[in-house]
Every structure is written in C-alpha cells, then in structure tokens.
Image (tube, grey):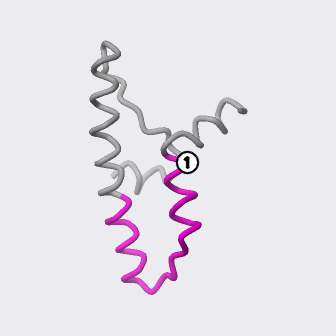
Amino acid sequence: ERIELLGLSVIPQHSDARILDQLVYKWKHSKAIIADVLTDKYSDLLDSGWRLEREEIERDVAGLLGGNFDRFIGA
C-alpha cells in the first residue's frame, strides 16, 4: 500500500529497529518484500499494456536500494 500511496520516491526503512543486528536482519527481509511488491506492480503494468523497459526497472530498484536517500542528502 505504501508504494501505491507514495510512489517510488520513498526510502524504505525500519523505524522499529533497536540495535544494529535488528536492522541488518530487517533489511535482508525488506529486500525480499520490495522485490515481491515490485514484481506485482510491474505485472499490473504489463497487464494494462504498458511496455516496460529494463532501464525503468533498474532505475526503480536503484532508487529504492539507496539512490533515493543519496538524492535526499544531496550526494
């Protein structure tokens, strides 16, 4: 739902991680969830007739896995 509401400009994060070990575990888990969500959304686009390019997928994944944060801090 968050991706549908906010789009792909978000920075996926876990605000409930209390120690570094939790953050590492949660990030591994999050990457799998992000992959599932993107797969579902890209499938919806393809079903609607959208022509999906590899570059679009690479852009979206790169943004979610660090690029959005880099842009936010001006790196």
| Residue 40 rendering spot, x and y as whole percentages | 32, 66
What is the chief secondary structure element of the magenta stretch? helix
Residue farthest to the bottom, as pictured:
49
Left or right: where 56 falls relative to 38:
right
Image height check: is 63 above or below 41?
above
Left or right: where 37 falls relative to 56:
left
Residue farthest to the top, as pictured:
19
Number of other residues with Cα within 10 Å of mark 1, as a class: few under 14, some 14 to 19, many 20 or more = some
Residue at (27, 39) in percent of width and height: 29
Which image quarter holds the C terminus? Answer: top right
Residue farthest to the right, as pictured:
74
Which quarter of the figure has residue 66? top right
| Residue 21 rendering spot, x and y as whole percentages | 29, 18
Give the mark count: 1
Which quarter of the figure has residue 48? bottom left
Which quarter of the figure has residue 36? bottom left
Q: Is residue 10 magenta?
A: no
Residue at (51, 76) in percent of width and height: 52
Q: Disc 1 designates what residue?
A: 63
Identify the secondary structure beneath mark 1: helix
| Residue 56 rendering spot, x and y as whole percentages | 56, 66
Image height check: is 31 above or below 22?
below
From the viewer's side, name the closer residue of 21 and 47: 21
Residue type of the residue flagged with mark 1:
Gly
| Residue 6 rendering spot, x and y as whole percentages | 47, 50
Q: Is residue 61 magenta?
A: yes
Residue at (41, 80) in percent of width and height: 46
Residue at (55, 74) in percent of width and height: 53
From the viewer's side, name the closer residue of 26 and 9: 26
- Which region of the structure is painted magenta? 38-64
